[in-house]
Amino acid sequence: MTSLLSAPPREAALTGSRGRHGRTVLGLVVLAVLLVVAVTLSLTVGSNFLPVPTVLDVLQGGGTSEARYVVAELRVPRTVTGLVVGAALGVAGALIQAFTRNPLADPGILGVNAGAAFAVSVGVAFFGMRDISSFVWLAFLGSLIVTVAVYLIGSSGRGAADPIRLTLAGVALGAVFSGMTTGMTLSNPDAFDQMRSWNAGSLLGRGFDVLLPVLPFIVVALAGALLLAPGLNALALGEDVARAQGAHVAGIRVGVIVTVTLLAGAATALAGPIGFIGLMVPHVARWVFGVDQRTILVTSVLLAPVIVLFSDVLGRVLIAPAEIPVGIVTAFVGAPVLIALARRRNASTLS
C-alpha cells in the first residue's frame, strides 16, 4: 500500500482533507453528546435532585405537582436560557476575534457589556425598575446604542473604520460607562440589590417570559453569522486578497458589528455579563478543528452551551443549598483552560 509520504501530492492532499473532515465530524459528535449530558444534568441536579425517569415523566405530562413545578417552571426555562446564552456568546466571541484579528478579543471589547450594565443602572436609579423582565430591554437597548457609538467614533476622521480603531473606541467607551455604572451603584446600594445578581451573570429566575422576547434576535443573528463565515475566511488572507476574491469588506465589517451586537447584547440582557465564554470557546475550537470560520462557528454553537450549563450545575452544588452565579464559575473554569492554551505553541494564532 502506498504510504502518505510517497503518494502523489494531489492524493496526499485528498487524504489529509479526508482525515481533517473525519476528525471534525467526530469532534462535533462528541460535543453533541456532551451537550445532551449537560442538559440532562441541568434538569436533574440541584438542591432538589430529581432522577432522570422523574424528569422524563414530567416532560410527558405526568409527575407530582412538586416535580412539575421544579422541572417545568424552574429548570426547563433555565436550561433553555443557558443553551441560548451560551450559543450567542460563543459565536459572538468567534466573530469578534476573526473580525479584529485579535485572539484576546471578546464580545465586551465593543462595549456591549458596559452599555448593557449602564442602561440597567439608569433604569434602577432613575425609573425605579426592580424586575429582571424590565432589565432585558434596557440592557439590549444600551448594548445597541454603545456599539453604534463605537462604530461612529471608529469611523470618524480619515479613512474607513478598521479593527484597531474600533477596538480602541470600544475599550475607551466601555471604561467610561463602567465607571459611571459603578458610581451609580455605590450611591444607592439598596436599590441595586437586584442588579448585583444580574451583574454577576446568572441563569436563576430566567423564565420564558424573559427569554422569548429576545430569542428571535439571537436566531436571526446566528443565521447571519453563518452567512458571514466565508467572508471572514477571505479576510483572514488580507483585505486586498479578500477584495480580489469578490468579498465586500465594508459589508462584512458592518455585518459582523451588527451580529455581535445582537448576539452579545441579547445574551447579556438575559443573563448579565458572563465572562470567558466568548474568549475561551473560539480558542478551543481553533486549537482542535483549525481556522475555518464555518467550523469554528458550528463548534462554538455546541461547545459554549456545554460550558455554560456545566458551570451552572457546578454553581448549584458547590455551596448547596445556596448557589454561585454562573458568571463566577465560568471565570474559575475558563482561566485554567486559557492558561493551558497559552502554554501551547501557536495557541493564540488566528491563522
Image (spheres, helix red, strand yellow):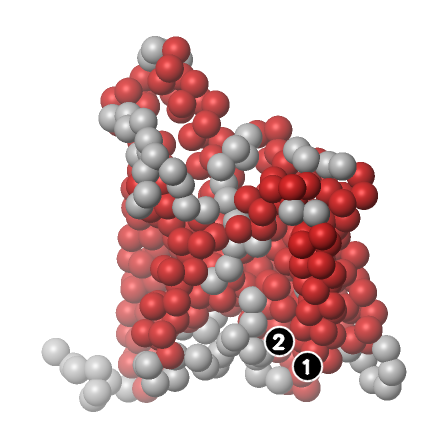
Does residue 98 show up? yes
Q: Is residue 57 above or below residue 148?
A: above
On screen, residue 94 versus residue 308, left or right, reads right
Residue 288 in the image, given as x and y percentages of width and height:
34, 69
Q: Residue at x 39, y 71 (%)?
A: 338
Residue pointed to by mark 2: 100
Q: In terms of sequence position, does the residue under pointer 2 or pointer 1 come before the other?
A: 2
On screen, residue 7 versus residue 224, left or right, reads left
Q: Tag 1's secondary structure?
A: helix
On screen, residue 10 versus residue 82, left or right, reads left
Residue 269 in the image, given as x and y percentages of width and height:
64, 46
Count of all numbered marks drawn on residues in the image:
2
Q: Is residue 92 above or below residue 86?
A: below
Work out whether residue 243 or residue 206 is closer to the camera in this orientation and state it. Answer: 206
Other residues around mark 1 within 10 Å, as few (<14) / some (14–19) / many (≥20)? few
Q: Are the two marked residues, 2 and 1, in contact with CB atoms closer than 8 angstroms?
A: yes
Q: Which mark is residue 164?
A: 1
Work out whether residue 346 or residue 19 is closer to the camera in this orientation and state it. Answer: 346
Work out whether residue 187 or residue 351 is closer to the camera in this orientation and state it. Answer: 187
Separation (CA) of disc 2 from disc 1: 7 Å
The quarter of the image holding the N terminus is bottom left
Does residue 252 show up? no
Q: Tag 2's secondary structure?
A: helix
Q: Is residue 47 above or below residue 187?
A: above
